[in-house]
Every structure is written in structure tokens, then in C-alpha cells.
Amino acid sequence: MLESIAQVVQAGALSQTLRGSIWLYPLVNTTHIVGIALLFGAIVPLDLRLLGRWRTVPLADLSRVLVPMAMIGLLLAIGSGVLLFATRPVDYVAEPLFLVKFTMLVVAIANALALRRASSWRLLSVAHPAAQAIPIRWRIAAAVSIALWLGVIAIGRLIAYR
């Protein structure tokens, strides 16, 4: 069933336009990379702060700047990723690494949402930043976050060059 949906998408006008345009596909690909850069560039400093770096910087202050950037990056990466997928859906559906990447992406997003829901940045900012004790579950979630996002990026690049 998934293969037949992929065939319909690949035969569609959007897929043909993306594949046939000398400018559109590179623009979408560039947007994807910019989205990844914004996402990963915002997530890593926040995760490193949760792991104990920059203890004098309150988590609330850091998250106020980085979380919106990560969200913009995620939206750009997902939106452009869907368009990139539309160029060769039959190939991607048959690619085992694509399922691994997609699964890691879903887990990474779920991890970020769970951490965001569990954390209380405002309460953490009340105490002196250096005195903040980061719960072990947040530190584990931060380490898992970095590993998952690195995995999504690495597998995405492997798929792109196969």
C-alpha cells in the first residue's frame, strides 16, 4: 500500500516539477539544510546547558532564545523534507535507512516535547543559575537528544548520497 501511494506521489505534478526544475530542487535542498542548521544549532547549546555547561546562564534565558529558533528550524526541515521526499518517494520507501531516519526523527521530537513539558524553565531561573541542580532525567534526555539529532542528520546524508 505504501509503495502504491509513493508511486502516485512520484507521478504527480509536484514531484515532476521538483525533479525537472534546475532551481527549485536546489532551493528546497538549501532550505532543508538551513532548517537543520537552525534546529541543531539551537538544540545543542540547550542540551549542553542541561548537561552542565554554562551554568551561569539561566535555562529560562537560554530557552527563551533557542526554543523558538529550534522550532523554526524544525518546521523548515520538515516542510522541505516532505518536498525532498516527494522527488523520489518510491526510492525512499524502499530504502531501509529511511525508516530508521523517520523513526529517530519521531523519537527525537517526542523527546524534545517530553523534556519541554517536564521542565519548568521559569522555576529554574529563580534560583541563582550556578546553584541549579539539573535532574538526572533531563540530563539523560539532553544526551539522548544530541545523539538522536546527530543520527537523523547522518542517516539523512547517507540516504541523500545513495
Image (tube, rainbow, N blue to C red):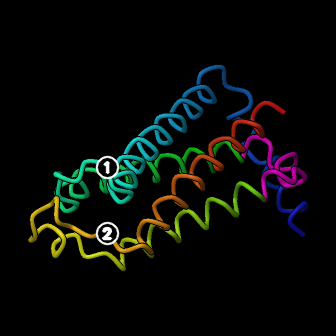
Res 99 quadrant in image: bottom right
- Residue type marked 2: Ile
**Which stretch did the figure color magenta?**
86-99
Viewer-proximal residue among 52 and 91: 52
* Residue occupied by mark 1: 53
> x, y (%) of residue 127?
10, 70
Q: Report, in whole angstroms, how far the alpha carbon at label 2 lies from the one at label 1.
A: 11 Å
Residue 62: tell me if it is visible.
yes
93 falls in the magenta region = yes
Looking at the figure, which quarter contains the C terminus? top right
Q: Are marks 2 and 1 in contact (CB under 8 Å)?
A: no
Q: Residues within 10 Å of mark 1 (few under 14, many from 20)?
A: few
Image coordinates of residue 89 in percent, x first then y, are 80, 49
Residue under numbered circle 2: 134
Q: Is residue 86 above or below residue 144?
A: above
Residue 92 belongs to magenta span:
yes
Q: Secondary structure at mark 1?
A: loop
Q: Amino acid at mark 1?
A: Arg
